Image (tube, rainbow, N blue to C red):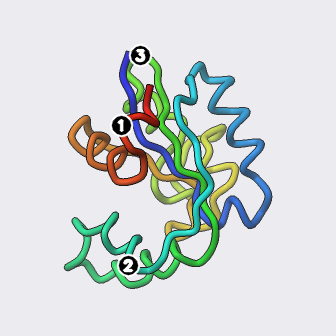
Amino acid sequence: MQRTFAIIKPDAVRKQAAGQILARIEGAGFAVRALRMIHMSKPEAEGFYHVHRDKPFFGGLTDFMSSGPCIVMCLEAPDAIRQWRDLMGATDPAKAAPGTLRKDFGASIDNNATHGSDAPETAAFELGYFFRGMELR
């Protein structure tokens, strides 16, 4: 079993799509090991996305991620990182495969409904950023 980090982003929460996304997550065989609704501050979003600090989209990304509540999760499944990325689909919803979360719930490359870790090291950092050790049993 492997764990990964996932976010239902503010655009999907605003559209009241979180329940549908959670149902699809469980329907795909993931176990939700931790879940919390949060509203990131701008500094919290900047810390989370620090690896993108020098990229031109950093300001817009952190503004968006601090614009409203989101749901942060620890998901568990065999090969969870790859499985979650497959379920999410391409970053740009216009290029995402039919039936993926971003195709069905995303509106644009900036408002694409979900986030997921891309590697075990990233998952470890991202899970640790939002969940204390005792919260991940």
Picture coordinates of residue 21, whole percent (x, y): 69, 42
**Considering only order in the chain, which callout, 3 or 2, is on the residue closer to the N terminus?**
2
In the depicted view, which residue is nearer to us: 74 or 133?
A: 133
- Quadrant in the picture for residue 57: bottom left
What's the residue type where badge 2 is placed? Pro
Q: Pointer 1: residues within 10 angstroms few (<14), some, or many (20+)?
A: few
The residue to which callout 1 is attached is 133
**Considering only order in the chain, which callout, 1 or 2, is on the residue closer to the N terminus?**
2
Give SS at disc 3: loop
Picture coordinates of residue 77, whole percent (x, y): 46, 20
The answer to whether residue 38 is above or below residue 4 is: below
Picture coordinates of residue 90, whole percent (x, y): 47, 49
The residue to which callout 3 is attached is 78
Point 63% across, 41% down: residue: 98
Point 73% across, 33% down: residue: 23
In the depicted view, which residue is nearer to us: 4 or 103?
A: 4
Instruction: Name the disc covering residue 43, or none.
Output: 2
